[in-house]
Image: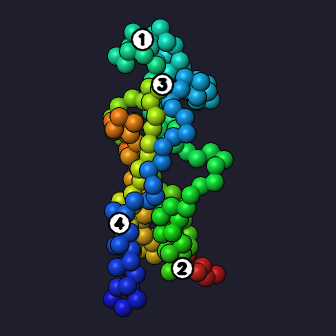
């Protein structure tokens, strides 16, 4: 392994475990209007999302947000996005030839339902950056981020793991 490769690996290792940025708190609390819009857009007719009477009789005891709305609560909308560490890492990898980016997978795990009135925070960190792999796209590294979503009382509602492949495009010969 060359000194350059060792230096690159050392810098990459320094990112693992680091926070992606400050904890983001949703601008608005979980609310029935947004839940209703989401359910309509997704054509999800589950009554625990929109029917107060039926939801009250469910195991949840009232309206809950669809778990798949998880990210919607903390997205910045049209607000300028604060540059986070993920942007810095992608730029660093691009400087070292890993200019191509492909999203590979997303995993969400749900622990507690979000209810109207809950205020959600998202805290992200760099979970892993893999060693270089040989792929059909070219030499590559997987960048995995992990977000934890909590309510204001500290309850862990869900986790969201997102993985992208940053690769060095290979020259195609004809």
Image quadrant assignment for residue 120: top left
As measured in the structure, the alpha-carbon distance from the residue carrying label 2 to the one carrying label 1 is 55 Å
Give the residue pinned by disc 2: 95
Scheme of image coloration: rainbow
Q: Within 10 Å of the Cα at label 2, are there few (<14), some (14-19), or many (20+) other Cα atoms? A: few
**Where the C terminus falls, by quadrant?**
bottom right
Q: Residue at x 53, y 65 (%)?
A: 87
**Element on which disc 1 rests:** helix
As measured in the structure, the alpha-carbon distance from the residue carrying label 3 to the one carrying label 1 is 13 Å
Give the residue pinned by disc 1: 56
Q: Nearer the viewer, residue 34 or 8?
A: 34
Q: Nearer the viewer, residue 172 or 71?
A: 71
Give the residue pinned by disc 4: 16
Marks 3 and 1 in Cβ contact (< 8 Å): no
Q: Is residue 132 above or below residue 18?
A: below
Q: Nearer the viewer, residue 161 or 76?
A: 76
The x and y percentages for residue 47 are 49, 16
Q: Nearer the viewer, mark 3 or mark 1?
A: 3
Marks 3 and 2 in Cβ contact (< 8 Å): no
As measured in the structure, the alpha-carbon distance from the residue carrying label 3 to the one carrying label 2 is 44 Å
The x and y percentages for residue 52 are 49, 12
**Element on which disc 3 rests:** loop
As measured in the structure, the alpha-carbon distance from the residue carrying label 4 to the one carrying label 2 is 18 Å
First reached walking from the N terminus: tag 3 or tag 2: 2
Give the residue pinned by disc 3: 116
Q: Is residue 17 above or below residue 152?
A: below
As measured in the structure, the alpha-carbon distance from the residue carrying label 1 to the one carrying label 4 is 43 Å
Per the rendering, the mark at residue 169 is: none
The x and y percentages for residue 58 are 38, 13
First reached walking from the N terminus: tag 4 or tag 3: 4
């Amino acid at each position: 392994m060359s000194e350059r490769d060792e230096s690159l690996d050392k810098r990459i290792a320094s990112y693992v475990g680091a926070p992606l940025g400050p904890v983001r708190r949703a601008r608005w609390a979980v609310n029935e209007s947004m839940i209703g819009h989401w359910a309509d857009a997704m054509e999800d007719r589950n009554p625990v999302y929109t029917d107060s009477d039926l939801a009250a009789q469910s195991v949840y005891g009232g309206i809950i947000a669809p778990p798949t709305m998880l990210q919607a609560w903390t997205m910045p909308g049209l607000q300028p996005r604060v540059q986070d560490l993920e942007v810095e890492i992608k730029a660093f990898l691009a400087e070292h030839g890993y200019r191509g980016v492909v999203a590979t997978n997303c995993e969400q795990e749900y622990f507690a339902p979000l209810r109207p009135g809950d205020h959600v925070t998202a805290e992200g960190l760099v979970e892993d950056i893999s060693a270089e792999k040989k792929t059909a796209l070219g030499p590559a590294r997987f960048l995995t981020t992990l977000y934890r979503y909590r309510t204001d009382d500290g309850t862990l509602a869900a986790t969201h793991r997102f993985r992208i492949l940053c690769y060095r495009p290979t020259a195609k010969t004809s």
